[in-house]
Amino acid sequence: MALSSLIGTAQLLPAKVASHFNGAGAPDGWMGRQDYLWSMAGVELALALLILGVFYGMRYFPPAAINLPRREYWLSEDRRAETFGILFRAGAWLASLVAVLFCGLHLLVVAANSSQPVRLSSAAWLLLAGFLAAMSVWAVSLVWRFWRVAQTE
């Protein structure tokens, strides 16, 4: 999603892109358009691969390194595959949340560079607050998923 927004809006960016902003929304860093697009794509892709790699790689961690509610229950031989499937799907959701954040940030950068004077909207703070709220819901639901199911069996 975020990569497609980069491609779809690339032509809307000026040759010199305001790519970094201070807390008040004023630009304090600039990049060439191609450098900005490659940087955004690279960071987003690297983060997605890192998140998915860690969540997939958990299956190779020693059980003592995995902190789950009811760890013995969830890491028993008969539930181990299910547990790592749940964790990998959770990682995919987390990678999706990060992609939505990057997509939103990019669209705000496009809008900022289209305005005169160049200024990042305060909506960036709302985007960040929404991301943090979504991360909180993600974390609580993941912990609740492991705690609740183990309680009922």
Image (tube, rainbow, N blue to C red):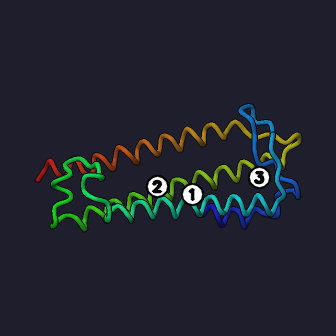
Q: CA distance from mark 3 to mark 2?
A: 24 Å
- The first of marks 3 and 2 along the sequence is 2
Say which amino acid is labelled 2. Leu
Q: Image height check: is 28 above or below 68? A: above
Query: Can you tell which of label 3 and label 2 is closer to the viewer?
Result: 2
Return the residue found at the far top: 24
x and y percentages locating residue 17 in the rendered image? 83, 52
- The first of marks 1 and 2 along the sequence is 2
Q: Which residue is mark 2?
A: 94
The structure residue drawn at horizontal position 88% and vertical position 42%, both measured from the top left corner, is: 116
Quadrant in which the N terminus appears: bottom right
Q: Which residue is mark 1?
A: 99
Could you say whether the residue bearing mark 2 is in a helix, strand or loop? helix
- Few, some or many C-alpha atoms within 10 Å of disc 1 (few <14, some 14-19, many ≥20)? some
Query: Can you tell which of label 3 and label 1 is closer to the viewer?
Result: 1
Could you say whether the residue bearing mark 1 is in a helix, strand or loop? helix
Say which amino acid is labelled 3. Val
x and y percentages locating residue 65 in the rendered image? 30, 52
- Few, some or many C-alpha atoms within 10 Å of disc 3 (few <14, some 14-19, many ≥20)? many
CB-based contact (under 8 Å), mark 3 and mark 2? no
Quarter where residue 89 is shown:
bottom left
Say which amino acid is labelled 1. Ala
67 lies left or right of 25: left
Could you say whether the residue bearing mark 3 is in a helix, strand or loop? helix
Mark number for residue 110? 3
